[in-house]
Amino acid sequence: MTPERQTVPLQSVDVQVDVKDHVATVVSTLLYQNKEEKPIEAVFVFPMSSEAAVCHFSAKVGQTLIVAEVKEKKQAREEYDDALSSGQQAFLLEESDQSPDIFSMSVGSLPPGESASIRLEYVTELDVQADDALRFCLPAVLNPRYQPAGTEGSSVKVTSVPSSSVPYDLTFSARMESLRPVSKVESSCTMEPVNYLNENHTKASVKLAAGHKFDRDVELLIYYSDSHQPSAVVEAAQGSAKPGSLMGDPALMLSLYPEFPKDIMSSVSSTGEFVFLLDRSGSMDCNMSNMGTSVSRIASARDTLLLLLKSLPMGCFFNIYSFGSTFEQIFPESVKYRQKTMKKALKKVENMKANLGGTEILAPLKCIYSQACIPNQPRQLFVFTDGEVGNTKEVTNLVMSNAASHRCFSFGIGEGASTALINGLAKEGGGHAQFILGNDRMQPKVIQSLRFAMQPAVVDISVNWDLPKGVSATVLSPPLTSIFQGQRSLLYVQLTGKSKKAAEGCVTVKYSLAGHPTENKLNFSLQPVEDTGLTQEKEDTSHKKVDAAKKKVIDLSVQSGVSSSFTAFIAVNKTSGEAIQGPLLRRNVPLPEMAWSKHLPMPLPMPLPMPMPLPMPLRNVQMCFSPLRVDSRLIVKGAEEREKPLSIMELSESSFMSGSSGEEYIPPAASSSRRSAPKRKRASTSQATSSLSSSAPKRKRASTSQGRGRGRGQGPRHAGYAAVNLYEDDLARVQELITQRRNFERALIQNLSPEQCRDVLTKAVDGDPGVLFDIITNNAPPERNIH
C-alpha cells in the first residue's frame, strides 16, 4: 500500500546480471498483479545508468508473449493511448526527454485478478574505480530533480515511500566471466559467498542475500587479476542480418590502458588553476544513504573538498564557489595557493552548510567560464553535487561549449546521484567522474581525480588500423577526447569484410602529450566469440555521434532494436479477446525515498503536484517531493464545500491555478466524472503523476506541462479559497523552514524576508482573499490554521 492507501501492483523484481569482461548484460523481470476490482494502469518511473542501452522489452500475460518494437517516441505514445482507449492491453517503455538515466514503464489495462510478467534487458559498460575494480550499480533510489525557472526540461516527479515500506521484493544475482581470473567481489549490500564456477576462477557468481532492504543502490565491485592488461573482444555478426549492415558485421570492443612515457611525465609541471564548485542546496542535507550511521551529503562533500584542498601543489591557483538558488565565491578571482590562502579557504569550507536553496548550477558555471584563464595555468574544474537537477542537458551543453578552456572532474555525492549529470559533466568536459557513497573509502577516489587533473591534457588523438586485406574498421564510439595514465579507454568498432580464422589486426592510438608525440599499440585476434552484448553497446555509443541528425538516430534505433531519447518500446496485446471495460485506475509504483540528515527534522510530507503558475518569485521553483498526504486542516469554500482535509496539491489547484482557464473546477473526489473527455490525457516520463480513472472511448495526450488527470490551470477564477491566520512567531518559523527544509525551499519561498513572507501568504491572488499553503502544518494548533 502507498501512503494514500492505494494497492501497488508491482509484486517482485528479479535481476540477473551477466558480466563479460567490461560489459554487463542485465535482465530484469517485473511481476505485476492487479488485486483490485477494476482494471488498472501501472506506471513505474525508475532510475537506470545513463550509460545503459535498452535492447529488449516484452510482456507475458498468461501464455501470451508480446515482444515490444522500437518506434519513434510520439508514434509509440499514440499507439499506446489508442490501444488503451479501445480496451486493449498495451505496454510502453520510454526514456526521459531530459535525462537519460530516468525511464518510465507503463503497464496498461491490466484486468482484475490478472498478472503480467515484464522482461527488460539492457547492456552497460562497467566503470573502472581508483583501486582497479570494475563497478556495476543497480540504482534503487531516484531522487527528485530540481528544475530552475526559465530553463529547458521538465521537473521529475517521483512516487516514493520509506525504504522499509517498499511493497515489492528484489532478488539479484550476477555471473562474471573473463579471460583473467576473478580475484574477489565486493558489494555495498549483503551478498552470499562468491561461487567460483571453474578451477582457474575465470567464471564466478554471487547472489544478494535474502531480506534485502531497499535502503541503498545495489553495487558490485569486481576485481580481475592483471586488470590493466589491454584486451580486445570480437563479437560475431547476427546470422539473419544482411552483411554490410549494422547488425550484419562483426563488432569489436577494444579496452586500452595508455601508458605515458616516464621521462615526459617527470618533466611536466604540476601547476594549474583549480576551481571547485560545491552544491549547497537543501537536498545536500539528506543522508548519504538510509543506513543508520550515514552522514549527510554536505558533510561528505565538505570532507572530499577539504582533502583536495590539502593536496594541491604549492604555487598553483585556486578558488571555491558554492551554489544553491544563489552562489558565492571565497575569492573574487583565483588566487595563488599558499599557506595564508589555504587556511582561509579551509576555514570557509568547514563552515559551509546546505542552506542556499534550490540546485541552480548554471549561474555559477557561467560565472566561472566568464573569468579569463590564467596564462600557462590549465584550468581544472571540480564539481561536487548530488545531481538533483532537471535541466541536465542544458548544464552539460554549457560544459561542452567551454571544453576547450578547461577540464571538468565531477563527484556524485550520495545514493541516487544522477549518473546522467555526473558522467555527462566529465565526458563533455574531458575529465573523469567519481561517485562517493556512504560506505566508500573516499581518499583513493579523490587522489585519483587530482592525479588525473595534474596530468597534462592529451591532444591530437588519432586511431590507426592495420588489418588484413579486405577488412576495414569503422569506429562507432564518440571520438576520444581525453586519455589518462593507466585509465581504461573503450573503443567500439564495426568490422566490414572477411578474414581468415587465424587473422590478426593492430590498432595504434597516437596523441600529443605536453608537446611530445606519443603512441600506444595493441595487437588482437579477429576470431569472433559468442554474443556478448557488444552490438547493443555500440549502438548506444553511436547515438552520440549522430545526435544532430534526429532521423538518422531514429532509423538506427529502430533497425538495431535499441531505444534512444527519440524512440520508445511499444507492445500491444492484440489477442486479448474482449475489450477491457470500465474506468481505468492509474497506480504509481513507489521507489524508496532517501532519509534526511540527522541534523534536521524530516521534511514535511507533501504530494507530487504539477508545475504551478505561482506568483513571482515563487515561480522560480517546482515541487519534487515524497507523495505523502498532508492533513492541512483547511476547508476550501466556493464552488462546493468540503469537510475532508485537502492536500497541498488540491489547495494549489483551487487557488494558484485560478484564473488560468475557464473550465469548471472539480475537486479530486468528483474528478472521475470529469475525465470522460473525448480523449484521455497522458503525461510524459518526467511529468506529474496524479490518480487516473478513465472510461473514455478515446484518449487524448496532454501537453508537456500537464500531468495525467487534471491539466494545468483548470480552476475557475473564484473556485475556492482558504485564509490562514499568521502570527509573528509563525512568520519566524516560516523563515526558518525556508532556509532549512528542502521542500519549502523548492515549493514555496526562496530567500524571502519575513515581510515578504507575510506579503506572499496574505496577498490576494486575482481577487481571492488568500494564498493556499498550510505553512505551519503539524506544529500549529488547529484553531490557528483556519480562519
Image (cartoon, rainbow, N blue to C red):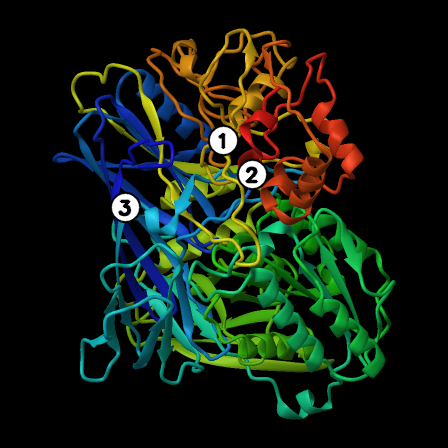
Up-down relation of residue 526 to residue 158 (above or below): below
> Residue 188: percent from the left, percent from the top?
38, 68
Relative side of 372 to 490, left or right: right
Q: Which residue is mark 3?
A: 168
Q: Quadrant of the C terminus?
A: top right
**Mark found first going from the N terminus, 2 or 1:** 1
Q: Which residue is mark 1?
A: 688
Up-down relation of residue 524 to residue 482 (above or below): below
Relative side of 406 to 52, left or right: right
Q: Is residue 469 visible to us here?
A: no
Up-down relation of residue 672 to residue 70 (above or below): above
Measured in 3D between alpha carbons, the distance from the residue under mark 3 to the one under mark 2, in whole angstroms, is 33 Å
Callouts 2 and 1 close, C-beta under 8 Å: no
Q: Quadrant of residue 206?
A: bottom left
Nearest to viewer (mark 2 / mark 1): 2
Neighbor class of circle 1 (other Cα within 10 Å; few <14, some 14-19, many 20+) is many
**Mark found first going from the N terminus, 3 or 2:** 3
Q: Amino acid at mark 3?
A: Tyr
Q: Amino acid at mark 1?
A: Ala
Callouts 3 and 1 close, C-beta under 8 Å: no
Residue at image coords 17%, 16%: 578
Q: Secondary structure at mark 3?
A: loop
Q: Is residue 34 visible to us here?
A: yes
Nearest to viewer (mark 3 / mark 2): 2
Q: Amino acid at mark 2?
A: Asn
Query: Can you tell which mark lies on residue 779?
Result: 2
Neighbor class of circle 2 (other Cα within 10 Å; few <14, some 14-19, many 20+) is few
Measured in 3D between alpha carbons, the distance from the residue under mark 3 to the one under mark 1, in whole angstroms, is 23 Å
> Residue 597: percent from the left, percent from the top?
54, 57
Residue at image coords 45%, 62%: 493
> Residue 103: percent from the left, percent from the top?
43, 43
